[in-house]
Structures are given as structure tokens and as C-alpha cells.
Amino acid sequence: MKKRLLIQLLTIILVVGFAGALYATPTVYLKETGVNPSSPGVIHFPTLGNVNVLYGEYDLAIDWDC
């Protein structure tokens, strides 16, 4: 009986803990603020295949929702 109560209590604590952690996780956004591409190229992604890109310097702003 005590073992079953302990397992139930631990399960409740874990569920509440994970729910709180998911709620507190911020969403992060990247916004391109400036681009200085220098040369074109191709990057291969396993799921997307070949993607044409411009290599260079990118200025990004990071924003998050708390």
C-alpha cells in the first residue's frame, strides 16, 4: 500500500514539474537585420536536398517571449 502511494505521489510530482517546465520555456525568434553576401553556393541538407544560398555575413537579432 505504501509503495503504491509513493509511486502515485512521484508520478504527480513529475507531471506537475514537466508541465511547469514546458510552460516556462521561452520561444526564440531570429530576425535578419542585415546581409552582406559575398558568393553564391549550395548546401546539401539530408531532408531538403540541395539548397542554393548566398555565403557571407548575416546580422541577426535574437528576440524571445517570456
Image (spheres, rainbow, N blue to C red):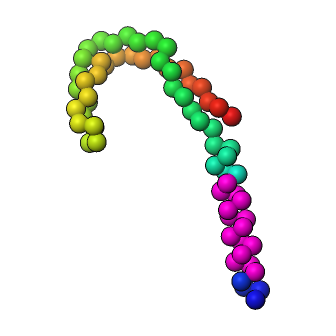
Which span of residues is magenta-colored?
5-19
The C terminus appears in which quarter of the rendering? Answer: top right
Is 61 displayed left or right of 56 in the figure?
right
Q: Residue furthest bottom?
A: 1
Q: Position of residue 47 (x, y in %)?
A: 28, 42
| Snapshot quadrant of residue 27 | top right
How many numbered circles are shown? 0
| Snapshot quadrant of residue 39 | top left
The N terminus appears in which quarter of the rendering? Answer: bottom right
Residue placed at 67% from the left, 46% from the top?
Answer: 23
Q: Position of residue 36 (x, y in %)?
A: 38, 10
| Snapshot quadrant of residue 13 | bottom right
Residue placed at 66% from the left, 50% from the top?
Answer: 21
Check residue 20 for magenta coloring.
no
Check residue 15 for magenta coloring.
yes
Placement of 8 over or under 62, stated as above or below? below
Placement of 37 over or under 51, stated as above or below? above
Prevailing secondary structure of the magenta residues: helix
Placement of 31 over or under 35, stated as above or below? below
Residue placed at 39% from the left, 16% from the top?
Answer: 57
Q: Position of residue 33 (x, y in %)?
A: 49, 14
